[in-house]
Image (spheres, rainbow, N blue to C red):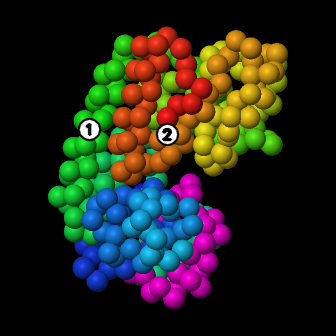
Amino acid sequence: MWRDAVGTPHQRADSSARIVSLVPSITELICDLGLAAQLVGRTGFCVHPRETLRAVPKVGGTKDVNLAKVRALAPTHVLLNIDENEKPVAAALAQFVPQLIVTHPLGPLDNPPLYRLLGGIFGCEQAAETLCAHFQQAHDALAQAARTWPRQRVLYLIWKDPWMTVSRDTYISRTLALAGWDTVPIGATARYPQLELDQSLPTDTERVLLSSEPYRFRDRDVAALNALPFMQRIPVTLIDGEMTSWYGSRAIAGMEYLRRLRESEADSGLPKQHLT
């Protein structure tokens, strides 16, 4: 028996299980565990692996789930996340879905238990253990390399109008910290606080990272910030948000990505405008 993030026990599913995933990174993980044939529904934001998912029906977004479409797919299991899906949606799904599996990774090290949770429930433990081994290798390589880099205080922006960032109590912040980037502001109580991007910018900010999601920052945003007088000495760069915010199997690629880009910067001595 396996327990999910809210303590609900789950028995092993049989090969007839029908899975709907309402979490993009979990959808990718399900496919990487070899369960794509049992995936019968996904959100419009579930885009990886692209070719595999073309034939899988969409059931709305992570927040605006089309319950009628989910019901029509007759899933035995729906995969949810505490941050990405809302409680009323989960309550409505519980009325007609036999098993809701709730996830809530809060940092990189929560990924191996996630692999094992889904691997155990759906009978693919070997695939889960393979992912765990790849994860550990990527994690150790990043952690070891990070010891050689100077730590930086970074403002990681995820939205504009209003400007929004991440607190240290987030998966993103803990992932960046593993690579030697400590997010500011330090004492934020909201997990995704709003802030004014002006002279009141946290005085200890050494760098600004503009994420590609949920808001897709572009070159023009970099140029606009670089033009502000109080930003003249603070590097502003674009960063791939999937590599910092997606858990599941993409976390492995994310740690490798962070290690490569920080190593490339250490070699050149200069921050790159595009972190790809």
| Residue density around tag 1, few if under 14, some if 14–19, many if 20 or more, within 10 Å | some
Q: Which residue position holds label 1? A: 136
Q: Is residue 92 above or below residue 155?
A: below
Mark seen at residue 244: 2
What amino acid is found at the position of numbered circle 1 in the picture? Gln
**Residue 83, percent across and down?**
56, 54
| Residue density around tag 2, few if under 14, some if 14–19, many if 20 or more, within 10 Å | many
**Residue 6, percent across and down?**
44, 60
What amino acid is found at the position of numbered circle 2 in the picture? Thr
Q: In the figure, is residue 104 to the left or right of 3?
A: right
On the image, which quarter does residue 139 sit in? top left
Residue 95 visible here = no
**Residue 255, percent across and down?**
39, 36
The residue positioned 53% from the left and 81% from the top of the image is 70
The residue positioned 56% from the left and 35% from the top of the image is 239
Q: Is residue 128 above or below residue 21?
A: above
Q: Secondary structure at mark 2?
A: helix
> Which one is in front, 55 or 215?
55
* Magenta-tinted stretch: 59-84
Give the Cα distance between marks 2 and 1: 17 Å
Residue 217 visible here = yes
On the image, which quarter does residue 68 sit in? bottom right
Q: Is residue 131 above or below residue 6?
A: above
Q: In the figure, is residue 229 to the left or right of 135?
A: right
